[in-house]
Image (cartoon, helix red, strand yellow):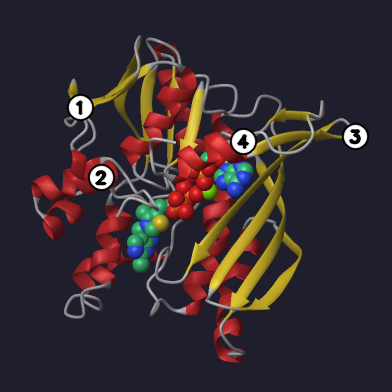
Amino acid sequence: MAERSEFALIRHYLSHLGANRRDVTLGVGDDAAVVVAQGQSLLMALDTLVDGVHFPSDLSAYWVGHRALAVNLSDIAAMGGEPCWALLSLTLPDVDEAWVSAFADGLGALAARHGVAVVGGDVTRGPLSISVQITGRAPATPLRRDGARDGDRVWVSGHPGDAMGGLSVWQSAVHRHQARWRGLRRAFLAPQPRVALGQALTGIATAAIDISDGLAADAGHIADRSDVAIDLSTLACRPSSRLRQWLGEAPAVDAQLGGGDDYELCFTAPASADDAVLSAARRSRTPVRRIGGVGIGAGMTCDGHPIADAATGYRHFER
Ligand SMILES: Nc1ncnc2c1ncn2[C@@H]1O[C@H](COP(=O)(O)OP(=O)(O)O)[C@@H](O)[C@H]1O
Ligand SMILES: Cc1ncc(C[n+]2csc(CCOP(=O)(O)OP(=O)(O)O)c2C)c(N)n1
Ligand SMILES: [Mg+2]
């Protein structure tokens, strides 16, 4: 295994475990698996949060709870599905009732808003970490990472990079509570999974992914899985003005391409579907922008150049 990354571990050791079942429509490699149970297509995904890795240790328990479910809802959103049932595994260093109560409020409020029932889980003692497994209903044609085609346009929702900016606002004792940076702070604290947009894009988008590791890295997964090249345009995807004010012009571009934690959707659609995409965005009340194009070839570029090292995205084992 030449490359030392979570992706290499998954590819080499974890992607073909267990039985080969005919009712698995889509296994490892997308935002969620698609399985068929009694004629119904279901989506399954799981993501974990580790204290100090996925959230700062002083983040309030309410927002940790919100985040634990939001990152999973985002995977269902990226498949165009309807989230329904969740399992929650909670590993805690100690019994801290106030913490668990606030955590439950944050997770419960987001679950209620999205019509999700938490139907079970597990509680153990150890370093603070949270896993949520989510199951949802799949649309007739789930959005996958492997459907982008030469000539498609690349789109993104929201303002990638703002969440990374918000994390650095949170980590700055001087700026954390300043009203001026409230919008950035919220972009990190309170990610809003784009479930309605994902659903509205089914039958329109050719591929989709949610942005957890960084826009360029995650668009790169669409390129790899679809066997195409993707070029992003810096003119089309200028970072938000609040991010440019907080970080400065060039670091804001790096954060936008490589920051991560956005939980926005990056998706592709043919040029003939521009109006349909804009109408899906309006119906789901979600801002979207065209940020690039799909071509023949492989890999990611930005304005025709390789993506800068500073913007290649989050890797668990390479820092
Ligand atoms: N331990 C594992 N065993 C089997 N499959 C895994 C494991 N970890 C990740 N995967 C799968 O590998 C793919 C990539 O994972 P990841 O980068 O975590 O995706 P995501 O950003 O959608 O959470 C997903 O399809 C995921 O289900
Ligand atoms: C304290 C802290 N430091 C750094 C980050 C940035 N960060 C941590 S993990 C991550 C990537 C997303 O996590 P991952 O486990 O790769 O999620 P997945 O791709 O499986 O959805 C990012 C951007 C953070 N959220 N919190
Ligand atoms: Mg994951």
Q: Are marks 1 and 2 in contact (CB under 8 Å)?
A: no
Q: Are marks 2 and 4 in contact (CB under 8 Å)?
A: no
Q: Quadrant of residue 115?
A: bottom right
| Residue type at the position of mark 1 | Pro
Disc 4/disc 3 C-alpha distance (Å): 25 Å
Label 3 CB sits under 8 Å from any ligand 1 atom:
no
Helix, strand or loop at label 1? It is strand
Please give the name of the residue rendered at 47% of the width and 71% of the height, measured from the top-left corner. Answer: 63
Earlier residue among tags 4 and 3: 4
Label 4 CB sits under 8 Å from any ligand 1 atom:
yes
| Residue type at the position of mark 3 | Gln
- On residue 38, which mark appears? 3
Disc 1/disc 4 C-alpha distance (Å): 29 Å
Earlier residue among tags 3 and 1: 3
Q: Nearer the viewer, mark 1 or mark 2?
A: 1
Earlier residue among tags 1 and 4: 4
Farthest right residue in view: 38
Q: Is residue 122 visible in the rendered structure shown here?
A: yes
Tag 4 residue: 15
Where residue 106 sits: x, y (%)? 56, 72
Disc 3/disc 1 C-alpha distance (Å): 46 Å
Disc 2/disc 3 C-alpha distance (Å): 42 Å
Q: Nearer the viewer, mark 2 or mark 4?
A: 4
| Residue type at the position of mark 2 | Gln
Q: Residues within 10 Å of mark 1 (few under 14, many from 20)?
A: few
Please give the name of the residue rendered at 40% of the width and 37% of the height, measured from the top-left corner. Answer: 218
Where residue 89 sits: x, y (%)? 66, 67
- On residue 256, which mark appears? 2
Label 1 CB sits under 8 Å from any ligand 2 atom:
no
